[in-house]
Image (cartoon, rainbow, N blue to C red):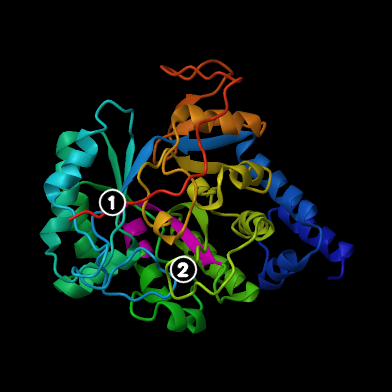
Amino acid sequence: MIRDTRRFANIADKVRHEVPLDQDDGVFLYHYPDLLAVGALANDRRERLHGDSTFFNVNFHINPTNVCEADCKFCSFARLTPESPAAYTMSIDQIRQKLQDRLDQPVTEIHIVNGLHGGLPFEYYKDCLRVLKQLRPDVHLKAYTAVEIHYFAEKYGMSHEQVLRELIDAGLGSLPGGGAEIFAERVRHKMCKDKASAEQWLAVHRTAHRLGLRSNCTMLYGTIETLEERVDHMLRLRALQAETGGFQTFIPLAFHHEGNDFARLPEPTGVDNLRTYAVGRLMLHNIPHIKAYWIMIGVKIAQVSLSFGVDDLDGTVQEEKIYHMAGAETPQAMTRADLVRLIREAGRTAVERDTLYNTRWTDDGAALPGIRIDASVPFSGHHTRVQLPVLS
């Protein structure tokens, strides 16, 4: 690689003057050999936006079913039929119990993602939201990817807007960002051709934003996409954000290769992870937050990412299935104290937020309310492979 310092300086000047970067700029940043320089530039942008603040929330995940009609080549979570080994579908009572077991926890968000189950009525998905809202009216439900919303619309003969309005009436608060994968048609045809297209994914989020919902956006990287296709993906997200302003957070999702048809592919390296976060921060000037999903990349790289443009570490998570079924060896949960400790160690200020980024608590070096943080004790996250239960 050639170290074109003049070109890099020109890009840095554009960033500092808030001039949007173009496709060639993004590809150049992926190739520029000085990773630390790219990271420093992204960190400068991050600190202009958020200072030292690093956000997290107290959340947990529910994945009510992994039965899915789509045969995505990169996916280790889905099972094509209810009879497939390790397939499961929770009852509404089981979903209620997931929250019942956590009523003593200060949970502010429940994150819900499913497979595309061909045998469930639309009422199931609404009941899932209703039962959680009945038990905890104050909890925010971030539920159902754009791929699911589009699937509901096609399966039940509704428009995107009709689906979203009915889910909002049942308690939906915002949309997660999953299912975007890579927008490039070449890649989608090879790895996920039987689910929502890039245009359909974007259309769902456009409609959600028009209805007043906020959402996240993602990019799956490390499969068969090119660097040019990664940058194109970011630019298409940026264009929709310029139109609607509804995206809160960009979340790069690192590919995990166990248990899927792309097992032959190597997973992204730590360098690729950090560079992708940095390039994302620099390309997506109009999306406020960049999130490192610690459960996917590990807490150590997540800490380092806080100097590469990242300002959000997601949350406590609890019982994550999708990436652990693909071989993730990270913990399935961390406590508030764990998160605050790793943020402090990275030299940042921990800010507990709700889903919509309203501040609930800011670290001033004192104890987290109700939890003692002892600097002499390492945080409890430890790398263990989790054996997942099969639910029926």
| C-alpha span from label 1 to label 2 | 27 Å
Asked if residue 216 is among those painted magenta in the image, a careful observer would answer yes
Rendered image: mark on residue 389? 1
Q: Residues within 10 Å of mark 2 (few under 14, many from 20)?
A: many
Does 213 sit above or below residue 355?
below
In the picture, measured across the screen, residue 313 lies left or right of residue 201, that is: right
Label 2: state its secondary structure: loop
Task: Please give the name of the residue rendered at 43% of the width and 71% of the height, measured from the top-left corner.
Answer: 260
Disc 1 or 2, which lies upstream in sequence? 2
Magenta residues? Answer: 205-221
Dividing the image into 4 quarters, which one contains the C terminus?
Answer: bottom left
Q: Residues within 10 Å of mark 1 (few under 14, many from 20)?
A: few
Task: Please give the name of the residue rendered at 17% of the width and 50% of the height, measured from the top-left corner.
Answer: 128
Asked if residue 344 is among those painted magenta in the image, a careful observer would answer no
Inspect the image, locate mark 2, and give the three-letter code of the amino acid beneath it: Glu
Residue 364 image position (x, y, % from top left): 57, 19
Does 30 sit above or below residue 100?
below
